[in-house]
Image (cartoon, helix red, strand yellow):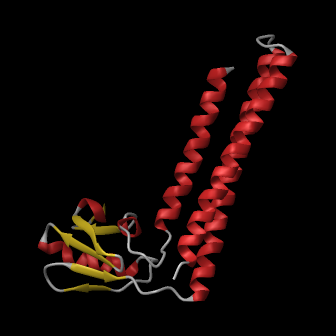
Amino acid sequence: MQSLLNDGKKRMDGAISALKKEFDKLRTGRATTALVDNIIVDYYGTPTPLNQLASVSVPDPKTITIQPWDKGAFASTEKAIMSSDLGLTPVNDGKIIRISIPPLTEERRKDLVKVAKKYTEDCKIAIRNVRRDLNDSLKTMEKDKEISEDEKKKGEADVQKLTDDFVKLSESTLEAKEKEILEI
C-alpha cells in the first residue's frame, strides 16, 4: 500500500512540475529565458529548438539576448521569434538579437491570469485523476483479498489527504504566479 501512495505522490508531483513549466512560459513583465524555450527555428530545413542553436541570456529584467552560434541562423531565428505567439519584436544588429519586453497592459495581465487559472484547473484535474486511479487500485486489492476493508478505508483516507495537499500546492503556485503577473 505504501508503494501505491509513493507512486501517487510521484504522479501528483509530475502534475505540479508540468504546471510550473506552463507558468514559466507565461509572459509576465519580467524577461526570462523560459519565454523563448519553446520556439522552434527552421535551421537549414530542420526544425530545431532555439536553445540548441544559440545562447540565450537575460542581461536585465526587460531584455532577452539571443546569440546564434552560426551567423547563417540569424535570419531564421529572427523569423521564428516574429512568428511565435509571444507578440515580441526582435532587433538584430548582426552580432546579437535583442528582445525588449514591453510592460503589459492591464487587459493583457487579466488575460494572463485567466490562462494561469486554466492551467491550474488542468493540474487539479490531473491530480484528481491520480486519486481516482489509486482508489480503484485499493478497491481491486480489497477484492483480491490483498488488503482488508479497514486497510482500504485507511488507504482511501491517505489518498484523499495526499490529494488535498497537492491541490493546495497548485493553488499556492497559482497565487504566486498571479501576484507576479499583476505586479507592475
Quadrant occupied by the N terminus:
top right
How many marks are shown on the rendered structure? Answer: 0
Q: Horizontally, is 43 left or right of 12 in the view?
A: left
- Identify whether 149 is placed above or below 100: above
Question: From the viewer's perspective, is 106 left or right of 38?
Answer: right
Q: Nearer the viewer, residue 48 or 9?
A: 9
Examine the image and state in which quarter residue 46 appears.
bottom left
Residue at 74%, 26% in the rendered image: 137
Q: Is residue 91 above or below residue 152?
A: below
Q: Position of residue 177 (x, y in %)?
A: 56, 66
Task: Tell me which corner region of the image, top left, top right, bottom left or bottom right, holds residue 34.
Answer: bottom left
Residue that extends furthest to the right in the rendered view of this protein: 149
In the image, 21 versus 54, the foreground residue is: 21
Q: Nearer the viewer, residue 1 or 81?
A: 1
Furthest residue toward top: 145
- Up the image or down, 37 lies above or below 153; here it is below
Question: At 81% across and 18% down in the image, what residue appears?
Answer: 151
Which residue is depicted at the point 74% across and 33% down?
Answer: 159
Q: x, y (%) of residue 26?
A: 50, 70
Residue 64: image x %, image y %?
A: 31, 75
Residue 145 drawn above or below residue 87: above
Q: Position of residue 88 (x, y in %)?
A: 39, 83
